[in-house]
């Protein structure tokens, strides 16, 4: 439940709005701690939007609470990074080169690559229908031994740190024509 108010008739109304917004903030923290990054970041963005409409005193009270929370700080950074990555894959102005299509058991998986020579970044986009429950999908993402079979030029992967059942940091090795490169992936099942 979010509140948008520009003026208050009395101090008790301000106290209720502050209390409700702080409860919403705790909900964002709880979602983040449950590794539900997209939901917690959406919640935080709604609070940000609501806070903009409040009187200065109420806005400052809520913002001070937000600034004091290390969880909200981490959520904001991770959420912004997640959204940038998501936008890159959905709205990239760069051309994606088809690596392989009609693969997978049902022939509906496509693998595309993109090398941005100006930055030296190499991207791999895998798209297709997932005909499984979410737990199986998360298990596949965390099964690093299989990465070399579905990521182009990948010669091997190993977990650096498994944080929980939905999050892991993974090191991948790539064998390009002129160089071998490593990358670190952060996986999030949300």
Image: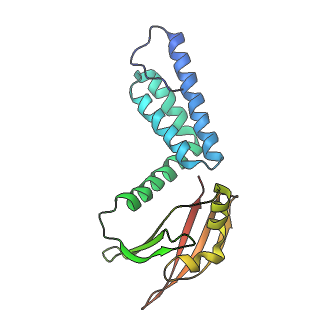
80 and 60: which is toward the camera: 80
Residue 105 image offset from top left, x and y in percent: 57, 72
Q: Is residue 149 above or below residue 18?
A: below
Q: Is residue 24 above or below residue 10?
A: below
Q: Residue furthest bottom?
A: 178
Instruction: Please state if 158 lies on the left or on the right of 177 as rendered.
Output: right
Residue 84 image offset from top left, x and y in percent: 41, 56
The quadrant in which residue 110 appears is: bottom left
Q: Residue furthest top?
A: 9
The quadrant in which residue 167 appears is: bottom right
Q: Is any part of residue 158 visible from this angle?
A: no
Q: Is any part of residue 141 visible from this angle?
A: yes
Q: Residue at x 60, y 45 (%)?
A: 32
The colour scheme used to paint the residues is rainbow
The quadrant in which residue 30 appears is: top right
Q: Residue at x 55, y 33 (%)?
A: 65
Q: Is residue 98 above or below residue 169?
A: below
**Looking at the figure, which quarter contains the N terminus?**
top right
Q: Residue at x 64, y 73 (%)?
A: 144
Q: Residue at x 51, y 12 (%)?
A: 13
15 and 88: which is toward the camera: 88
Residue 163 image offset from top left, x and y in percent: 68, 60
């Amino acid at each position: 439940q979010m509140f948008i108010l520009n003026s208050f008739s009395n101090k008790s109304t301000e106290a209720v709005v502050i209390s409700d917004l702080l409860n919403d903030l705790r909900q964002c923290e709880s979602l983040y701690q449950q590794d539900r990054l997209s939901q917690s970041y959406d919640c935080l963005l709604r609070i940000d939007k609501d806070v903009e409409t409040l009187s200065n005193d109420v806005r400052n009270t809520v913002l001070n609470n937000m600034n004091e929370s290390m969880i909200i700080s981490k959520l904001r950074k991770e959420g912004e990074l997640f959204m940038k990555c998501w936008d890159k894959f959905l709205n990239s102005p760069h051309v994606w080169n088809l690596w392989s299509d009609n693969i997978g058991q049902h022939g509906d998986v496509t693998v595309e690559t993109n090398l941005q020579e100006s930055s030296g970044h190499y991207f791999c986009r895998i798209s297709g229908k997932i005909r499984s429950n979410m737990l199986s999908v998360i298990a596949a993402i965390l099964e690093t031994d299989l990465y070399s079979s579905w990521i182009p030029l990948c010669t091997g992967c190993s977990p650096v740190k498994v944080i929980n059942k939905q999050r892991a940091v993974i090191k991948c090795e790539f064998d390009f024509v002129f160089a071998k490169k490593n990358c670190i992936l952060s996986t999030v099942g949300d």
